[in-house]
Structure formats: C-alpha cells, structure tokens
Amino acid sequence: MGNMKLSQRINNTPSSPIRKLEAVARNAKARGIKIYHLNIGQPDIKPPAIMINWLKKSTINQIKYTESQGDRRLIGSLVKYYGRLGAADIDEDNIIITLGGSESILWSFLAVSEIGDEILVFEPFYTNLRGYASMAGIKLAAVTCKIEDGFHLPPNQVIKSKLTGKTKAVYLCNPNNPTGTFYSPAEFKRLYQFCLANNLFLICDEAYRDFVYQKVESATALNFEKKSKSGQIIVVDSFSKRYSLCGLRVGFLVCRNKELISSVLKFGQARLSAGDLDQQIAARLDVVPGSYLKRVRQEYQSRRDIIDQGLKNIPGAIFKKPAGAFYFMVKLPVGDADRFCQWLLTDFHDHKETVMLTPANGFYLTRGSGQEEVRLAYVLNKKDLKRAMIILQKAVARWNR
Amino acid sequence: MGNMKLSQRINNTPSSPIRKLEAVARNAKARGIKIYHLNIGQPDIKPPAIMINWLKKSTINQIKYTESQGDRRLIGSLVKYYGRLGAADIDEDNIIITLGGSESILWSFLAVSEIGDEILVFEPFYTNLRGYASMAGIKLAAVTCKIEDGFHLPPNQVIKSKLTGKTKAVYLCNPNNPTGTFYSPAEFKRLYQFCLANNLFLICDEAYRDFVYQKVESATALNFEKKSKSGQIIVVDSFSKRYSLCGLRVGFLVCRNKELISSVLKFGQARLSAGDLDQQIAARLDVVPGSYLKRVRQEYQSRRDIIDQGLKNIPGAIFKKPAGAFYFMVKLPVGDADRFCQWLLTDFHDHKETVMLTPANGFYLTRGSGQEEVRLAYVLNKKDLKRAMIILQKAVARWNR
C-alpha cells in the first residue's frame, strides 16, 4: 500500500536472528509438538519477592514522570550497590537510569561516536548491537574469537589490526552473551590498558555480572580504573537478567566522566522519563537479601553442568564449558546449523517433543563464520533441561544418519 | 576527569528548555517560596481507577519480555479503539507499541529519513523533537506560525518555500503542544493533500487528540486517508496525557503501510520489549468508561477558560483562546520572557508565592522568535489556577513598574 519509499537505513537494519524462527515454532506448536526453548534469554527464575510485593503493598494513585536522570531512590540504591562492589567513589552524578539496558547501549554509542565512526566488538556478539549501530549511524567492526579458545580475547596485535582512524570505542559484554565466556581480571586489564593506549572508550556490558561460576573476584569494570580515574570505562547494565525482570524496562549507565552523564541526560530529557513503577520496583534492590543472587547463581551453575554433560554425549560436538552468564555455544557436526535448527522445528520430533536453538551465524559479522555453531540458553528447570539434551543428542544422530 | 572527547553530536544536542529553570526553582523553594507550576505537562488528574486497580487485583509473579511488537491484548484494545474512531480497517499489523510516545517519534524519523535529510515542523513546536532529530542525524526545518493567527497553518506556498530536495516528512501535533491550537478538519485536509502532492510522509502526533474544546468531530488523522489508503500518514501517540499516566512509558505508532510497521519492528526487536506491567495497565483502555474522558475534557475546558479570563486582565497580553490540549501560549509585555520567567523565581513573590512558566523561545528554531512569549500548562486545580493567574497579573505589573 502506498508507493512512498522507506529509508535505506531502516531497510538495511537486520531482523533479529533470535526471533526469525518464531513463525516456524508457532507452526510446530500448532501440530501438537512440545518445544523446549533453549533459544531465548528469558529466565524462568522467580524475581525477588520483596520487589514484586512492593506493587501490592504501596498505594499507587498516580504514575508520574520521574526525573529524567532517574528516580532518586533507585539512583541512591545503585550508589550503595557500587560501594559494596568496591567502587566507593561512584556518586549520584555518575549514574543515569535508562529504559532497559538497550537504551544505555544506544546512548553510549551516540555519546562517543560521530555518524560513520566505528565501534569494535568481539564476535560472536550480542546481535542487537546491529540495531543500535543502525540507529546511531555507525559501523561495527569485529574481532573474531574462536570456540576452540573458549572465545577468549585474541592477542593485542589482532585487536589492533582492526582499528581505523574512525574507531572510537570497544564494546565488551562480561560475562558474555552469547558465549558465556568470563574474561578474567588479567584479561580484562589487558583490554583496558589497550583502550588507554589507543584513546578508546571501553563500553562494558555487565548485565550478567553476578553470574560467574568460578572462584574469582567478580568485580565491576569500574574497579579497574580506580587509580587512573580515566573516565574511559562506560558501564551499561540492566535489571532484566540479574533479578529475572526482563519485562521491567530499567537499565543504567555508569561512568566516572560526569560530563558524559550530563550529556546523555539531554537524551534522557528528550524522552522525558523512564517508567515510574518499574523504577520503584528496581529501587528495592537495596533490600534484596544477598542470599537471593547466591541461590540463583547456584541454580545456573548446575544447569550449565547439565548442558556440559549433555554435549559430551554428542560425538563431534566442540565446546569449552563457559564460566558465566546462562549461555552455552557449541559447534555441532551438522554442516549447516541454520538448516538444522529449522529442521528441528519442521521435520524432527522425539515422542512429539523437540528443542529450539539459536543458530550462531547471526552473532557474527564475518560472513561464513559460526556456520555449525548454535547458542543454548539454560533458562529451563533442570528436569526439562536434561530431557532437552537427550532430544538434542537424538536429533544430531538422526540428522547425520 | 579524563581527556576523552565526547561526540560533537551529543555536544550539539540541546538541553530541554522546559527543564532549564529547575535549579532556580529549587532555590526558590529552599527560600520558602511556594511555586505554582504552570511550566510542565504533568497532569494532576487521576488516571482511570480501573487501570490502576489492575495492579492490585492481578497475581504478578513474573515480569517478562512481551512480544517486541507489543502485548497482544493491548494491540487488540487499540484496534477496537480505532474502530470506534471510524478507522475500522486498522488491524493488528498496522500497530506497534513503543516505549512512550518519544520512541514512536524517533522511529518514525528513522523510518522515513536518511542521515542529513530534513523533516518539516511548525514552530513553535514540541521542543524534544530536537533531541530525536539529533539522535537520528537529521535536520528540522521550521515553518513559522504566528500568535496573532492563533498559530494556525500558513498558506501552502509558505510551507512549500521551506521544502528542499531532502525534505521527507512533515510533523504535526494536533491538538498542539505547546500552542493548544486545534487544526480543523479542513485545515488538516489541506496539509494532508499538500503532503500527497509533494510525496511527503505526514507524522501526526495525537497525544492530545481527546482534548478538543469545541463542537467538531475530533477525528484521528487516519480517517483522512480512508479513501486514498496512501499509507503516508504515520500516527504517533501515547497514554501519558490521555489517561494522566505520564510515568507509564507506553506509546504507539500506527500506519496503513504495513511494511513500515514490520520495518520499525526491527528496532523493536533490537530493544526487545516495552514494559510488561505498563502495557498490561494500558491494555485496560478497552474497559475505561467513556465518561472518564468526558469528565477530564470538561475539567480542562473550564481551566482553559480560567486562564483566558486571567490573561484578559493583563494589559498588553496578546493571545487567542486555544481549542485543544492543556497549553496556552501568550505574548506578555515583558520585553524578554526568558529573563522575566527567571525573575519570577529569583526576585518576585506575592505573599511568598510565585508562578513558574516556560519561556517560549526554546520552542522556536528561528532565532529571535517568541522572545516575549511564554507557555502555560493548565495542570493545576481551578482554585490554584485562579490564584496563579492573579500572581501573574501582579508580576507583570511589578515587572513594568
């Protein structure tokens, strides 16, 4: 209808590779197939009761704009949070609340780059960055990480080879979505020093920061610039994963450079306010008992181990057990993971049950990369997860028969 | 801290002129001055009880991502809403839910323009458009409307003179923020036909659509293309003003061009979801009794009349009584409205009370325009509003003494 042309930039914006199998999945369900969803990052864990219960207990009459920087109580709760993490110098003027982690990433891009500039990512990477890059009119450049290395960072000279005169920042998600990789303090420090040496901002996505399954100090990136106070680290974060509150659109951006915060506040003013109710719920983070995150971490860790065990039973599967987040990447002996993931929904079932996975090629910029890789999100209970892994083993065997 | 440069584009993004007097106002309050806030568009009206009460009655255990296009019940409620308005052909695929009206405007800009393109606005205009234009990398071009004409649209040749090869769309807010002007059906039709003739999208902001204080069919812009079905009209809208739910970040974008909807859905997927709770509340719009909006409209109408009467008592004040929204623009005999509004907060009081207004120069792109104009938002109860108008009369008299 109509013959008006839409913009090239919207035509060039990619669809989400995570969501492209949705229609095929709906068809499978219509045929009576039960699907175990290992494809999405929507946790099944219960959020902290003390947050949700606030909705029942409080007397809500009005739902008003909050300050554009964010609800004061929420910002205060985050100041305390960073104090407990060891970044005691972070104060209210270092923080701005955003409409989800998504908005904090978009604003960080806009704050550090001009149109046509580049931001460096490590592939496979969080695929929605493409959408933000498209909105911000910038280019993503990718440094490839390898499944055989557990997706750890390559040597500095490899990273350096991807820099151009237009590179303004490096984006790192730690622990990583989609790989689950946790970059050690030494590894992170190397990257931070690389950014210092090359005058680059370092955008650190810490949405999964509390989910690390090994005995290391799980520090915020902000702790690494406590001495230099360079203001080059921009932390972007969200409540979605930490407290299993995906539908709560509350994220935040933290930076020691207060000018950066007051500058992105101009975008905040333009969109007026984040959600009033959602921020009130999030503000209760300061009364969530420490045992909550500990229990969640233990739950994810045992789920990760179920996936690890299940994949060991698939001949030819290549993977390293990741130490963080709730994702697992694996190279399956299936030739074309895209076709395999589709086939799982269209042609395969085991006693009327199948699994849904995310083909990994959408997480790469480099063409032809990740063709045999898939991402698994362990957001199902342990019983379902065990069953899903058995289905996957059978499926790979059937595919290769 | 740090010597890393922020982007030029963020440095060039203007601060909100509505919020720049906030610090001065805080100081006045600290000195014990009571301020009547006529400066902000945060209504004091109670939202529909049936929406708020849903929070208490429902059993909320999880707060999850909704579909990126929006909660199905909410979209269904909006389909019915447009059906009642006379646009019965609008279906689910013509609608996408956004994080506030702000996001719907930003997406409409991105959908129709390339970087460097232009969008035409009528000044004085909703100042936050500057922020979205900055984010989208486009330029706003302004057609000036005059207070003496009640800010109605100038002749087509005046509008046409502002077009360049890069103009892709016209943005119109009807009824208007900041002027309160309601563009009649004939006036709107002329603009729509102008857009058809010049291959321009017409972005219609209908956030104030239900607040029209004269006997006309208050139709949605979509009704004007029922015959042509050109798909050139993009309606952007919000729940903030209609139901006094500013802190509910739910807006929506409606267009007959389904390709446009499926294209902006890619931005929707990149930011995953709008707020779960907020959408559930908004979805109850289909059970809000019609009497609710009628009562709100009557309340605003009598407030408008109080302002109108109050301004008539200010010698030299120039204005036309507007027919919509809850804003009133007036040219005051004060020389420099910016300084006057500041002085109201720093030097003036009447029995320890003063008023806060928004100087209008920030609503204009053309330098030097609107120097004597201010915007009043009638978001106070009638008693307070009457007192505020008396204070304003005294203040203008004192200023000119």
Image: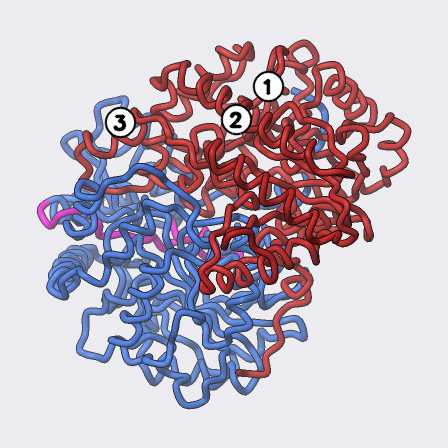
Chain colours: A red, B blue
The reply to whether discs 3 and 1 touch (Cβ–Cβ < 8 Å) is no
Of the 4 image quadrants, the one containing the C terminus of chain B is top left
Give the CA distance from mark 2 to mark 3.
51 Å
> In this orientation, does residue B145 appear?
no
Q: Does residue B78 sit above or below A299 in this rendering? A: below
For residue A300, the mark is: 2
Q: Could you say whether the residue bearing mark 3 is in a helix, strand or loop?
A: helix
Residue at the disc numbered 1: A213
Q: Does residue A115 sit above or below B160 in this rendering? A: above
Residue at the disc numbered 3: B29
- The mark total stands at 3
Res. A237 image quadrant: top right
- How would you rate the neighbour count of disc 3 (Cα within 10 Å): few for under 14, some for 14-19, many for 20 or more? some
* Image coords of residue A178 (percent x, y): 65, 38
Magenta residues (range): B359-383
**Disc nearer the start of the sequence (2/1):** 1
Type of residue at label 1? Tyr
- How would you rate the neighbour count of disc 1 (Cα within 10 Å): few for under 14, some for 14-19, many for 20 or more? some
